């Protein structure tokens, strides 16, 4: 079984557990939006993982839009560590399976080869683990090198004859009245 198929199976089991517990009200009285958001993000995560595992090309840089963008914010998932374990006890099984998957040498090599895997897995690990497994951080973006000053050759004579540019006087006297 491939790494992507194992990940998809883990996400499938987690989606079933989330849907079953959400139907029973495990996420609170108005839990439907949260369950739908979590379920859709998990599905999207599994699909994205499969695409990346197949060797998706790097995305092309997009042109930036002028002006501020208005972002419509809907409900968001909690951000604290292991938040999914309390309302969905079945998530502990998914967490142990995910940890075993991430300890696999093939999975480690796959994740280390492409930083997009780390960005994809980090929110899931935060939701399932109190102490998430070590996922390599993406490399820092390359910045252009700072311009260096040109070195003056030792054989060149300093320009002692050149006078500094004349500075205008700070105070101008008033014109003489005749």
Image: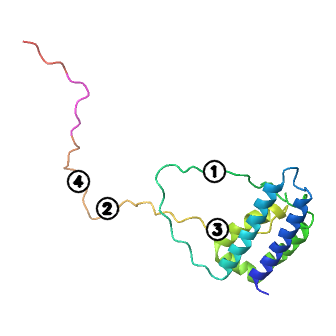
Q: Earlier in the sequence, mark 1 or mark 2?
A: 1
Label at residue 152: 2
| Residue corresponding to mark 4 | 159
In the drawing, does residue 154 fall left or right of residue 168?
Answer: right
Label at residue 82: none
Q: Is residue 136 visible?
A: no
Q: CA distance from mark 1 to mark 2?
A: 56 Å
Q: Earlier in the sequence, mark 3 or mark 1?
A: 1
The residue mark sitting in front, 1 or 4, is 1
The residue mark sitting in front, 3 or 1, is 1
Residue at left offset 57%, top offset 49%: 70
Q: Position of residue 105 (x, y in %)?
A: 77, 82
Q: Position of residue 154 (x, y in %)?
A: 31, 64
Q: Is residue 128 visible?
A: yes
Depth order, front residue of 60/44: 44
| Residue corresponding to mark 1 | 72
Question: Is the residue under label 2 in contact with that under label 4 (CB below 8 Å)?
Answer: no
**Is 20 a magenta residue?**
no
Q: Residue furthest top?
A: 178
| Residue corresponding to mark 3 | 138
Kindly state the secondary structure of the residue where label 4 is placed.
loop
Kindly state the secondary structure of the residue where label 2 is placed.
loop
């Amino acid at each position: 079984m491939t790494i992507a198929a194992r990940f998809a199976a883990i996400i499938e089991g987690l989606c079933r557990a989330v849907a079953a517990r959400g139907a029973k009200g495990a996420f609170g009285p108005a839990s439907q939006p949260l369950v739908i958001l979590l379920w859709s993000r998990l599905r999207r995560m599994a699909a994205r993982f499969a695409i990346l595992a197949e060797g998706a090309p790097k995305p092309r840089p997009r042109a930036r839009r002028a002006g501020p963008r208005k972002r419509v914010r809907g409900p968001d998932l909690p951000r604290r560590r292991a938040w999914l374990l309390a309302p969905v006890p079945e998530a502990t099984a998914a967490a142990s399976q995910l940890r075993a998957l991430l300890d696999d040498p093939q999975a480690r090599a796959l994740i280390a080869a492409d930083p997009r895997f780390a960005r994809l897995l980090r929110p899931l690990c935060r939701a399932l683990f109190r102490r998430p497994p070590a996922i390599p951080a993406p490399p820092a973006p390359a910045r252009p090198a700072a311009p260096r000053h040109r070195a003056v050759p030792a054989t060149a004579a300093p320009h002692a004859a050149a006078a500094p540019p004349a500075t205008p006087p700070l105070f101008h006297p008033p014109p003489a009245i005749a």
